[in-house]
Image (cartoon, grey):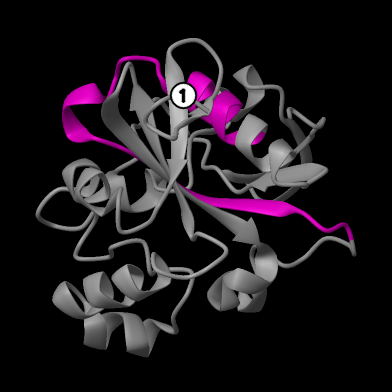
Amino acid sequence: MNARGDRKASGSLTVEELSKKTWSDFETVLGTNGGARGCWCMHWRLSIAEWMEGKGEGNKRAMKRLAQREPAPGVVVYDDGTPVAWCSLGPRSSFPRLERSPLLANLDDEPVCAITCIFVQRKHRGSGLLPAILEAVCEYAAAAGYTTAEGYPVEPRDGKRAGADTAMTGIASAFLAAGFAEVARPRGDRPIMRRALRDAG
């Protein structure tokens, strides 16, 4: 770690767990809308009814409570000290809606670090940071004791760009560039991808 308490990662990127200390940086990344449509990254953690009821401030309060607990619900990613992205991660059991999803059903008994959301701050989008963000997140997950990372990206078809709602789980090409491999494809545009992790610490 450096003087900020960040965990060193690839290149100039560092990650720091979401906590009271990093909450304002999380807000900076997600913006006034809390990501897409007042989500505040509660999409996979709540039922659709609970999510809709808490949309906006309710979801924000729910995430703020999670940020005060262990394990952290995710990490803020920094580029040379500037918050540029947020990544939600943890065991699949942390994400009840993911566990219930028929599309993204559990493949096997492998204990994985589920990477459920990668949200890049608006002014840093299109800068090619996603593979490096994933690399930094994987180094964090390895140091936390995980042996496998699992992602659920989209693969836009017919030259279309993924919108904020669908791109929240990441883009398949970035996962490939970060060393992930496809292990299943439950739908044409939705691969499930994994990467073996080594202990980075």
- x 34%, y 36%: residue: 85
Among the 4 quarters of the image, the one containing residue 59:
bottom left
Q: Nearer the viewer, residue 91 or 165?
A: 91
Q: Which residues are magenta?
A: 110-138
- x 62%, y 37%: residue: 140
Res. 118 visible in picture: no
The residue positioned farthest toward the right in the image shown: 109
- x 24%, y 56%: residue: 36
The residue beneath circle 1 is 2
Q: Nearer the viewer, residue 103 or 52?
A: 52
Residue 91 falls left or right of residue 125: right
The local secondary structure at tag 1 comes to loop
* Residue 48 image point, x, y percent: 39, 82
Q: Mark 1: few, some, or many residues within 10 Å (few <14, many ≥20)?
A: few
Residue 132 belongs to magenta span: yes
The residue positioned farthest toward the front in the image shown: 3
* Residue 75 image point, x, y percent: 45, 45
Among the 4 quarters of the image, the one containing residue 57:
bottom left
Residue 180 falls left or right of residue 171: right
